[in-house]
């Protein structure tokens, strides 16, 4: 795992978008695991700009989103399908049939969850999985005590998670669904590469627990410590509780591969 500390949320989003863009350029038929939420909106906007201005080509890509609310129709503006179509898919040249989200309206949720796992396997697995970390320490909707080997399934959301997501429902926590379908922790860990974006001081304590604390099902995000190719991109505010920040900064400044990205971000050598 590598932790990259950048000056602000904009810079962190830019690096995240560059990592995804390089994955697509290097493997045009990449299978991308995608995430939703306010943290990711700038990432998608930057990827749309790279598509429009530099010809970043998504035509052969296939995507699988982490989660979807149960009981919210795809055309509902509060669904994650609507979020992804509105902020990303309709602005790039992906075949919409190659973009996948869990079916929160399925009559048989457990069968739909198994079908989602089958679809990921049929595509050869996920090449790069984009992640955020929730206020309860979750990745996807893997709330506390989610099994580390869990697969795509339905979960009841914690009050903290519903409060965090209330902004997308007009600030009314009572409108936030209480259940969702999510990729499991085990599903996420099978992706070949993880890119985790975390910004804001409100995430600082949970980020420190996830990347420097013990691996525990009480903080499902801590499972990323087990992944052999995981990059965690954070801003200064989110990094404020990290004990190893000096070393993380030294690595980003001195590793040859990261020096290239520093240059692309317009960061002067230290």
Image: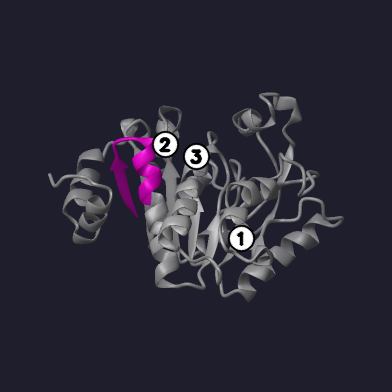
Which disc, if any, is residue 199?
Answer: 2
Name which residue lies at 87% across and 55% down.
Answer: 107
Q: Is residue 11 magenta?
A: yes
Name which residue lies at 41% across and 68% down.
Answer: 25
- Magenta residues? 1-15
- Residue annotated with mark 1: 64
Secondary structure at numbered mark 2: loop
Up-down relation of residue 208 to residue 226 (above or below):
above
In whole angstroms, how far apart are the C-alphas of marks 2 and 3?
Answer: 7 Å
Q: Is residue 46 magenta?
A: no
Dot 3, crowdedness within 10 Å: few (<14), some or many (≥20)?
some
Model colouring = one colour
Question: Which quadrant of the figure contains the C terminus?
Answer: top left
Q: Position of residue 69 (x, y in %)?
A: 72, 44
- Residue annotated with mark 3: 39
Is there any visible trace of residue 238 in the rendered image?
yes
Secondary structure at numbered mark 1: strand
Determine contact: label 1, label 3, CB under 8 Å. Answer: no
Determine contact: label 2, label 3, CB under 8 Å. Answer: yes
Secondary structure at numbered mark 3: helix
Between residues 201 and 244, which one lies in front from this camera angle?
Answer: 201
Mark 1 and mark 3 lie on one chain; the one further toward the N terminus is 3
Between residues 181 and 51, which one lies in front from this camera angle?
Answer: 51
């Amino acid at each position: 795992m590598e932790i990259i500390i950048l000056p602000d949320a904009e810079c962190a989003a830019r690096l995240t978008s560059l990592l995804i863009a390089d994955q697509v350029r290097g493997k045009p038929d990449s299978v991308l695991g995608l995430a939703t939420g306010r943290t990711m909106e700038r990432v998608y906007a930057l990827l749309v700009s790279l598509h429009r201005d530099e010809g970043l080509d998504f035509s052969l890509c296939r995507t699988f989103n982490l989660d979807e609310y149960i009981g919210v129709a795809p055309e509902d503006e509060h669904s994650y399908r609507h979020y992804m179509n509105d902020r990303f898919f309709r602005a790039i040249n992906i075949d919409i049939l190659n973009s996948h989200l869990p079916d929160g309206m399925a009559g048989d949720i457990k069968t739909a969850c198994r079908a989602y796992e089958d679809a990921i396997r049929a595509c050869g697995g996920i090449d790069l999985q984009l992640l955020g970390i929730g206020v309860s320490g979750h990745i996807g909707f893997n709330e506390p005590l989610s099994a580390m080997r869990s697969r795509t399934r339905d979960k009841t959301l914690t009050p903290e998670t519903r409060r965090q997501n209330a902004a997308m429902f007009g600030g009314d926590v009572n409108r936030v669904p209480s259940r969702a379908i999510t990729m499991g922790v085990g599903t996420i860990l099978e992706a070949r590469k993880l890119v985790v974006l975390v910004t804001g001081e409100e995430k600082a304590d949970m980020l420190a627990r996830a990347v420097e604390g013990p691996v525990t099902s009480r903080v499902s995000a801590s499972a990323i410590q087990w992944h052999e190719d995981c990059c965690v991109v954070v801003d200064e505010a989110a990094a404020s509780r990290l004990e190893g920040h000096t070393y993380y900064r030294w690595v980003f400044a001195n590793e040859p591969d990261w020096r290239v990205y520093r240059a692309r971000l317009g960061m002067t050598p230290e």
